[in-house]
Amino acid sequence: MTDAEVVVLPPYFTHIGIESQGEGDGLLSFREEIANSGGFIHGGALEALLNFTMLRTLHAIRPGLRCALVTITVNYLAPTKGPVLGTATVDRAGRNVVFMTARATTADKTVATGTAVFQLSERRS
């Protein structure tokens, strides 16, 4: 991705501490601000990590397009204090709709998986 194609993602991702890793991956480390009442990373933060990795992966293969999340489903498999690495793949990409899968893993296990559908459109000037 060139400097001209750098994608600006919502500041929420930075706010909760998600860091870019490579072209589409993201890393989320534990912080008290994103903990649930049990002391683990909150499910909402894990969903954001999955969303982040899918958006970054999508922007890498379809630069310059607007990507709107239509639906996302998250399966929470295990509690964690991280760090958690998020990765994503494209399952099917049409002209206007893309189906994706993401995975959140620690060093030894998968803690969440997700599927999402994105609607693509041209950016408005």
Image (cartoon, rainbow, N blue to C red):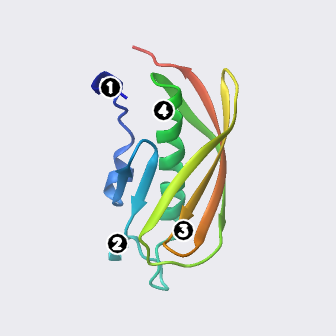
| Closest to the observer, 121 or 7 | 7
Residue 72 at least partly seen: no
First-in-chain label (2 vs 3): 2
| Residue 90 drawn at (x, y percent) | 64, 39
Instruction: Give the labeled residue for mark 1.
Output: 2
Q: Nearest to the eye among marks 1 and 2: give it.
A: 1
Q: Amino acid at mark 3?
A: Gly
Tag 1 secondary structure: loop
Relative placement, left or right, of 12 versus 43 is: left
Tag 2 secondary structure: helix
Q: Quadrant of the C terminus?
A: top left
Residue positioned 50% across, 78% down in the render: 80
- The circle on residue 109 is none
Instruction: Give the labeled residue for mark 4.
Output: 59
Instruction: Give the labeled residue for mark 2.
Output: 33
Q: Nearest to the eye among marks 3 and 1: give it.
A: 1
Residue positioned 56% across, 34% down in the render: 68
Q: Nearest to the eye among marks 4 and 1: give it.
A: 1
Q: Amino acid at mark 2?
A: Glu
Are the two marked residues, 1 and 2, in contact with CB atoms closer than 8 angstroms?
Answer: no
Residue 119 lies, with reference to residue 51, above or below; the image says above
First-in-chain label (4 vs 2): 2
Are the two marked residues, 2 and 3, in contact with CB atoms closer than 8 angstroms?
Answer: no
